Image (tube, rainbow, N blue to C red):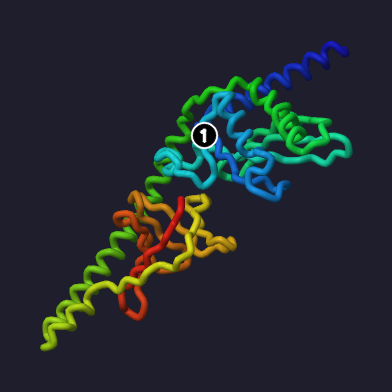
Amino acid sequence: MKLKYFAILVTCLLSTSIFSQANLNNYKYVIIPNKYDFLKEADQYQLNSLTEFLFDKYGFQTLMEGSNYPEDVIRNRCLALKSNVIKDSGLFKTKLTVELKNCNDQVVYTSEMGESREKEYQKAYNEALRDAFKSIEALNYKYVPNTNNSIAVSQNVENESEVSKEIQQLREEIQNLKKEKEAVVSDKVEPKVDAVAEPIVKEAPSGVLYAQAIENGFQLVDSTPKVVYKIKKTSIDGVFLVENKNATLYKKDANWILEYYENNVLKQDVLNIKF
């Protein structure tokens, strides 16, 4: 009887391992955060860099949070998993686990707990993380495209198509307003009025805005850090919709232009954005 229960337990564990491996194999990328919640600074003790190194070592394609993402993951965020390292409380041990979430913020994998008895933080975190990655190494990860991702991509394309239509309508409205202004100007005697038809361009503040990846786009934060804008991707490369503001953001030459109407006057702000 004991052997029967033991065999059932082994079968369940093997099934769980096989499911986890197959499940992870359907994801192409792993996004590494710049900072973990239990630490005070970005990449403190080089823990984030070590996470990236270990995922790369065991076959995963890694992306640092806020970096320039490949085209396929921009169009379909469900190709990527978001990684996190969680610290468990321990009196004499440093305990870390690695967690992976999908695009719906659901946990799809949690590693075995890695431990270290080292007293120095640098050595303890390094040793505990490497220990946690032993269970990830055992998965023998290898990317296998999932047909469900194709469905997700097609759904994203449909959504982006709707956004594209909105942008096109906005552009048509802008062109119509320009034509109306030009018609009014042509009826006037003073030739200098022609300048009114051109958009008013304001120089951007000297502060730099830093782009941080969020779902379907980015949030632009200043150095405090404070979220200044939230922008959503569109099907047009280099064109974003600005959340809670009737405005568009697009790249022109080397500049990012925020374009919007204020009192029926088309205005443009030049933003200094670091992606």
**Front in this rendered view, residue 39 or 233:** 39
**Front in this rendered view, residue 250 or 272:** 272
Q: Is residue 199 above or below residue 100?
A: below
Q: Is residue 262 left or right of residue 147?
A: left
Image quadrant where residue 73 sits: top left
Task: Look at label 1 and name its amino acid.
Answer: Tyr
Q: Residues within 10 Å of mark 1 (few under 14, many from 20)?
A: many
What's the residue at 35%, 66% (across, down)? 259
What's the residue at 58%, 34% (across, down)? 52
> Residue 126: image x %, image y %?
71, 32
What's the residue at 35%, 62% (across, down)? 257
> Residue 262: image x %, image y %?
36, 77
Q: Is residue 241 above or below residue 17?
A: below
Q: Is residue 154 left or right of residue 49?
A: left
Q: How many marks?
A: 1
> Residue 210: image x %, image y %?
50, 56
State the residue position of label 1: 29
Quadrant showing the N terminus: top right
Image quadrant where residue 122 sits: top right
What's the residue at 84%, 34% (across, down)? 93
Q: Is residue 162 left or right of residue 90?
A: left
**Front in this rendered view, residue 117 or 10:** 117
